[in-house]
Image (cartoon, helix red, strand yellow):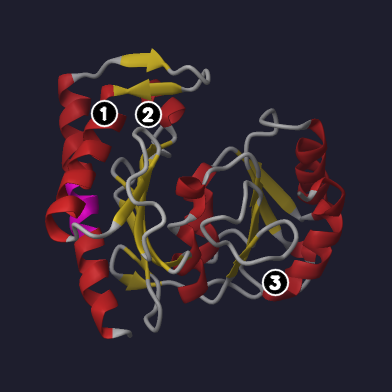
């Protein structure tokens, strides 16, 4: 592996440890919930996690930029940038559903190179970086073979979010698979890397929703692209397609084409 990325990955896992401790304490202590101007929910735990992670990044890597969900971006045009989603799935967190987690990514030159996805309730953690196998809870994982979309297990995001054409495209894609699941969020992304889901598609996302999964999926042998088949860089937009087997790319893109931005 690129030598300095070993240290970056180690530090990213330390950030995940910090997040887990804050979330676990909040579950015992309780938390406050409010609605942001855009209508989405936020808790004091979201803000506490992001604040703690930003402080640690600033102390260890003062020249690195930070892109996060809850606060203003810092030096986002820097060559080295951290991308943080303190609680991906705040609605799930607020309602006691366990599929929420902290997403941590490190990017260089606009390309996500290190990713950690931490889920405190299920005790799952996926880690990925170049030239090393992706792991879930310290054990190597990989995608599974699935050359035929008709045999695929397909996960899609919230069908009520964003435009009707995007929702319809996801519905059409889900219908092409053998089985489909909805609403797994980023946890379903991790399951593509672990070979339990063959394809995941979502839309209306921000960069902090998907940056972490890019190195995780690639390290497991999969592919992370937009609905037009372009790489998922920091400015890739809001439509995400995650493939366990790259042979699913063509039929997936054909299905999503009408709604691709």
Q: Position of residue 206 (x, y in %)?
A: 53, 43
Q: CA distance from mark 1 to mark 3?
A: 39 Å
Q: Which residues are magenta?
A: 13-18
Please report contact status of discs 2 and 1: CB closer than 8 Å, yes or no. yes
Q: Tell me if residue 115 can be seen.
A: no
Q: Residue 72, relative to residue 197: is it above or below?
A: above
Helix, strand or loop at label 2? It is helix
Mark 1 lies on residue: 45
**If you read the primary sequence from the N terminus, does the residue marked by circle 2 or circle 1 appear first?**
1
Q: Position of residue 245 (x, y in %)?
A: 66, 73
User: Crowdedness of circle 3 by 10 Å Cα count: few (<14), some, many (20+)?
Assistant: many
User: Crowdedness of circle 2 by 10 Å Cα count: few (<14), some, many (20+)?
Assistant: many
**If you read the primary sequence from the N terminus, does the residue marked by circle 2 or circle 3 appear first?**
2
Q: Residue 207, relative to residue 96: is it above or below?
A: below
Magenta run includes residue 53: no
Residue drawn at x 78%, y 50% is 260
Please report contact status of discs 1 and 3: CB closer than 8 Å, yes or no. no
Mark 2 lies on residue: 93
Residue drawn at x 52%, y 21% is 38
Residue drawn at x 21%, y 19% is 30
Q: Position of residue 140 (x, y in %)?
A: 37, 74
Mark 3 lies on residue: 146
Q: Could you say which is closer to the camera, residue 138 or residue 243?
A: 243
Q: CA distance from mark 2 to mark 3?
A: 33 Å
The N terminus lies in quadrant: bottom left
Number of numbered discs overlaid on the protein picture: 3
**If you read the primary sequence from the N terminus, does the residue marked by circle 1 or circle 3 appear first?**
1
């Amino acid at each position: 592996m690129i030598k300095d990325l070993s240290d970056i990955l180690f530090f990213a896992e330390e950030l995940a440890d910090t997040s887990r401790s804050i979330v676990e304490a909040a579950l015992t202590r309780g938390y406050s919930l409010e609605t942001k101007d855009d209508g989405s929910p936020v808790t004091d735990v979201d803000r506490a996690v992001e604040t703690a992670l930003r402080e640690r990044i600033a102390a260890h890597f003062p020249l690195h930029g930070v892109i996060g969900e809850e606060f203003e971006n810092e030096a986002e045009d820097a060559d080295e940038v951290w991308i943080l989603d303190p609680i991906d799935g705040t609605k799930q967190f607020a309602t006691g559903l366990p599929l929420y987690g902290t997403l941590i990514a490190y990017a260089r030159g606009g390309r996500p190179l290190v990713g950690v996805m931490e889920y405190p309730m299920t005790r799952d953690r996926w880690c990925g970086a170049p030239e090393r196998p992706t792991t879930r809870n310290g054990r190597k994982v990989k995608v599974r073979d699935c050359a035929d979309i008709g045999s695929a297990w397909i996960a899609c995001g919230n069908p009520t979010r964003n435009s009707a054409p995007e929702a319809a495209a996801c519905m059409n894609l889900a219908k092409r698979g053998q089985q489909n699941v909805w609403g797994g969020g980023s946890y379903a992304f991790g399951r593509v890397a672990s070979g339990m889901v063959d394809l995941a598609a979502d839309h209306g996302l921000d960069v902090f929703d998907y940056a972490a999964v890019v190195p995780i999926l690639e390290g497991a042998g999969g592919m992370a692209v937009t609905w037009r088949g372009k790489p998922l860089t920091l400015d890739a937009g809001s439509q995400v397609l995650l493939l366990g087997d790259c042979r699913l790319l063509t039929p997936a893109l054909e299905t999503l084409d009408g709604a691709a931005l």
